């Protein structure tokens, strides 16, 4: 941590306590301080290292394509593009393919610890995507991943040893979280990376 950050953290905790004590008494000051401390811990937990993800491409290793879907893949343009990436058309070596759908957990579901609706939606996206890709000759296994797209990719790149990653998203306006993840993945992935935007020419 940079030396200048520690004083800011101390100030961020101390100021609400002092203000609360002055305005509403000791109990309010301590409550405000505790709230700020909880927020700081939450932010610290959510922050992740920003190092590179995966290994640099090795031409001697069999291609493994990780297709990450923030929404179901079913339109002909997207399925054809993924089939091309997988080598089904014969222009490239055939790749082993895994489809990954992050479980996109809503705010209320997270607070209620109700993860099942998000997992069911992710599984539906996987069923539709795997079936659509099978029609164009892509055989793939499927996984539900972490709600955070970048974390989900990082987990799978490590276990699946993906050599290339394709991220399927909506437009920036329709899917801002996936758009943000695409920017971070483009910066951090050491593997090949491509983003496909559903509904736009690829």
Image (cartoon, rainbow, N blue to C red):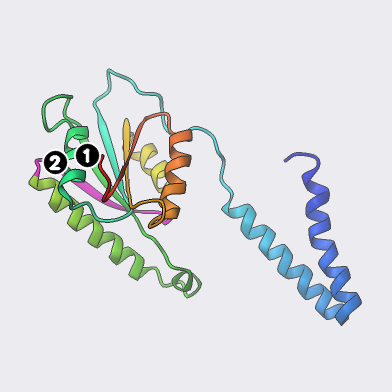
Look at 40% across and 24% down and name the residue there: 56
Magenta range is 136-147
Give the percent coordinates (x, y) of residue 144: 31, 55
- Is residue 148 visible in this depiction of the protein? no
Other residues around mark 2 within 10 Å, as few (<14) / some (14–19) / many (≥20):
many
Viewed as shown, does residue 30 lie left or right of 163? Answer: right
Residue tagged by mark 2?
A: 138
The quadrant holding residue 173 is: bottom left
Residue in the picture at 79% in, 59% down: 12
Q: Is residue 85 above or below residue 7?
A: above
**Residue at disc 1, secondary structure:** strand
- The image quadrant where one finds the N terminus is top right
Q: Look at mark 1 in the image and give the residue it sits on.
A: 97
Q: Is 45 drawn above or below residue 36 in the view shown?
A: above
The image quarter containing residue 25 is: bottom right
**In which quadrant will I find the C terminus?**
top left
- Picture coordinates of residue 107 (x, y %)? 48, 69
Looking at the rendered structure, the secondary structure element under dot 2 is loop
Q: How far across and how far down the image is residue 152, in percent? A: 40, 48
What label does residue 155 carry, if any?
Answer: none
> Decide: marks 1, 2 in contact (CB < 8 A)?
yes
Compared with residue 122, is residue 198 higher up or lower down, i.e. above or below? Answer: above
Is 165 on the left or on the right of 37, as rendered? left
Q: Please tell me whether residue 140 belongs to the stretch shown in magenta.
A: yes
Query: At x 57% / y 41%, what residue is drawn?
Result: 49
């Amino acid at each position: 941590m940079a030396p200048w950050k520690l004083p800011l953290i101390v100030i961020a905790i101390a100021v609400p306590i002092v203000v609360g004590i002055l305005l509403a008494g000791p109990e309010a000051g301590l409550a405000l301080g505790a709230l700020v401390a909880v927020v700081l811990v939450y932010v610290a937990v959510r922050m992740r290292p920003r190092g590179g993800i995966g290994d640099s491409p090795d031409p001697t290793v069999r291609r493994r394509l990780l297709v990450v879907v923030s929404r179901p893949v079913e339109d002909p343009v997207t399925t054809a593009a993924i089939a091309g990436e997988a080598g089904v058309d014969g222009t490239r070596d055939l790749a082993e393919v895994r489809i990954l759908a992050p479980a996109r957990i809503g705010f209320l579901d997270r607070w209620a610890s109700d993860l099942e609706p998000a997992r069911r939606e992710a599984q539906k996206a996987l069923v539709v995507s795997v079936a659509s890709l099978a029609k164009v000759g892509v055989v793939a296994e499927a996984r539900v991943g972490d709600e955070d797209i970048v974390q989900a990719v990082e987990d799978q790149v490590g276990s699946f040893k993906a050599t290339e990653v394709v991220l399927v998203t909506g437009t920036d306006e329709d899917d801002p979280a996936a758009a943000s993840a695409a920017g971070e993945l483009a910066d951090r992935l050491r593997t090949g990376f491509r983003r496909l935007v559903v509904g736009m020419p690829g």
